[in-house]
Image: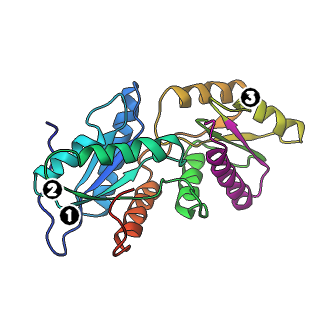
């Protein structure tokens, strides 16, 4: 059994529902620590709210286990936040399956699932852009005249479209030509995207890492970016803007009075 964690007492009238963060998961221990750091940042930003981390793969506990433990602890409700930047397979399939599994045994718990952190069907969140800008500033990426938004990659065309919307929003915000690159499953890669910007006249190229946590993909992007002579930013991890975005996702579903408490 995975303990629900401190602060996971039954929520009464006026008490905030516990928040369960669900990350993709990685064999890289740095990724899990980044998720835990984000959970701490969200908890610090909203004292009194229990914020619990979970993972779909590689790291325990999974979201179904956390939800079952909350139900056993007497929690009637919880809010689940997918720590995903696109609404692809994991959001469409894995997250609903985890919520369904949590309800198959033990006490019932009503679960509201938020939107992913990247744009789904709506506009790009200004907080997400601010977090990406923060990481670029921290990397010393000043006075660049070309930008690559480096994402993990997906075969889902709709999800790639959402990455493109983030790149377009960064282009409009920063006023520099901006291209997308992918670490897997789609093209172009970082090196090709940097080369394309240089062919268009850019001389100082920066790479904005569109990742929530460090790991294999960010390492590969960083190596390729530096090999191409570009500065690369760190993952968003526990950036204050990301913690704020998580809470706004929570608030959006918490205001949905009468909406179904499942995906």
- Residue in front for this viewpoint, 245 or 96: 96
212 relative to 81 in the view: left or right: right
Residue density around tag 2, few if under 14, some if 14–19, many if 20 or more, within 10 Å: few
Residue density around tag 1, few if under 14, some if 14–19, many if 20 or more, within 10 Å: some
Q: Position of residue 202 (x, y in %)?
A: 84, 42
Q: Position of residue 154 (x, y in %)?
A: 61, 36
70 relative to 197 in the view: left or right: left
Closer to the N terminus: mark 2 or mark 1?
2
**Which segment did they paint magenta?**
154-181
Q: Please name the residue shown 39% across and 31% down the image.
A: 30
Q: SS for tag 3?
A: helix
Is residue 229 at all visible to an observer of this figure?
no
Marks 2/1: CA–CA distance:
7 Å
Tell whether position 180 is magenta: yes
Q: Position of residue 159 (x, y in %)?
A: 61, 46
The disc placed on residue 48 is 1
Closer to the N terminus: mark 1 or mark 3?
1
Q: Please name the residue shown 28% across and 43% down the image.
A: 101
The disc placed on residue 191 is 3
Marks 1/3: CA–CA distance:
46 Å
Q: Position of residue 75 (x, y in %)?
A: 15, 58
Q: SS for tag 2?
A: loop
Front disc: 2 or 3? 2
Is residue 255 at all visible to an observer of this figure?
yes
Residue density around tag 3, few if under 14, some if 14–19, many if 20 or more, within 10 Å: some
Q: Please name the residue shown 67% across and 43% down the image.
A: 157
């Amino acid at each position: 059994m995975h303990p629900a964690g401190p602060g996971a007492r039954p929520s009464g009238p006026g008490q905030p529902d516990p928040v369960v963060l669900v990350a993709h998961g990685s064999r890289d221990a740095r990724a899990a620590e980044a998720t835990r750091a984000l959970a701490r940042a969200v908890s610090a930003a909203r004292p009194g709210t229990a914020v619990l981390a979970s993972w779909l793969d590689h790291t325990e506990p999974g979201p179904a286990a956390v939800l079952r433990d909350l139900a056993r602890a007497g929690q009637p409700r919880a809010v689940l936040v997918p720590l995903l930047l696109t609404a692809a397979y994991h959001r469409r399939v894995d997250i609903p399956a985890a919520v369904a599994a949590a309800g198959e045994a033990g006490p019932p718990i009503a679960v509201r699932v938020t939107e992913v952190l990247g744009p789904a069907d709506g506009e790009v969140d200004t907080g997400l852009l601010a977090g990406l800008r923060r990481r670029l500033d921290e990397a010393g990426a000043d006075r660049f005249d070309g930008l690559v938004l480096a994402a993990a990659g997906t075969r889902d065309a709709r999800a790639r479209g959402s990455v493109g919307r983030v790149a377009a929003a960064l282009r409009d915000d920063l006023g520099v030509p901006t291209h997308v690159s992918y670490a897997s499953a789609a093209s172009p890669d970082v090196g090709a995207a940097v080369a394309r910007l240089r062919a268009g006249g850019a001389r100082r190229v920066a790479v904005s890492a569109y990742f929530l946590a460090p790991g294999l993909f960010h390492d590969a992007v960083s190596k390729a970016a530096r090999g191409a002579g570009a500065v690369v930013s760190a993952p968003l991890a526990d950036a204050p803007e990301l913690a704020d975005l998580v809470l706004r996702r929570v608030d959006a579903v918490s205001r949905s009075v009468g909406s179904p408490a499942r995906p």
